[in-house]
Image: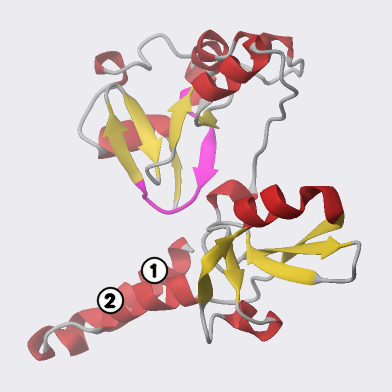
Amino acid sequence: MEYTIREMIARKGRKPEETDYAASNPDALDFRLISGDFYEWNGGKLRFKECADVMDFKQTVKAFPPFENVRYASREKMPYFTGNLDILMAARERGEEIAVEGGPCLFGEHEVSVSVFLKNGETRLFDYASGKAYLHTKDISGSAGFSEMESLADYLRINGGQTERISFRQEKEGLTPQEYLNLRIRLRSPPPLADRWSFPFLICHIANI
């Protein structure tokens, strides 16, 4: 679906002046976005997929002052999807090196894979979104599943010093297993409703992917 933050606020039953976006730049509220409706209220802010708060530029700078140093013309005219800025700020105050990440952090399972290559020739494959290890390389399709015994974070913590390189790969070519399960839910309507409603639900869901 295509929408703006202003439209999503209304969709969730509020007006901008009743939320933390009362003083937001109008251009940020009217910035057009494309994604599914995965929003809920987190206090006065919208929260996306239970992991990222939607903020304007000034709100982001208030939570993480170094963001003020980011310079580009439209920086105050777009929304920002943020998470764990307090942890990021605490790390900076301790003098730790930090980085800001975006993009695939909001992808679903089986969309982006991470290959870790060790100096001894060993290679392990992980899912970027969940951090889970694939049992085998062929499991990228989701046919067999993940190992519950190992995660990307644990693997790098143990083998960080022996890591030669890390590569990322976009794996999505069609519906992922996660999206397929969502489609099945739409199609499993009670018999009296199946003929009438299942097909439109399917079209709407594909249009929103």
**Magenta stretch: includes residue 94:** no
> Callout 2, which amino acid?
Arg
Q: Would residue 59 appear left or right of 41 to someone viewing this image?
A: right
For marks 2 and 1, the one nearer the N-term is 2
Magenta segment: 29-38
Q: Which of the 4 image quarters holds residue 77?
A: top right
Q: Which residue is mark 2?
A: 186
| Rendered view: 153 above or below 143 | above
Task: Please tell me which residue lies in front, 197 or 71.
Answer: 71
Residue 45 x %, y %: 34, 25
> Marks 2/1: CA distance?
9 Å
| Rendered view: 21 above or below 40 | above
> Callout 1, which amino acid?
His
Q: Which residue is mark 1?
A: 205
Residue 152 x %, y %: 63, 57
- Under circle 1, the secondary element is helix
> Which colour style is shown?
secondary structure
Residue 92 x %, y %: 66, 15
**Tag 2 and tag 1, C-beta contact below 8 Å:** yes
Seen at 70% across and 69% down, the residue is: 125
Main secondary-structure element of the magenta-colored stretch: loop
- Under circle 2, the secondary element is helix
Q: Would residue 159 appear left or right of 80 to someone viewing this image?
A: right
Seen at 24% across and 16% down, the residue is: 18
Seen at 18% across and 87% down, the residue is: 194
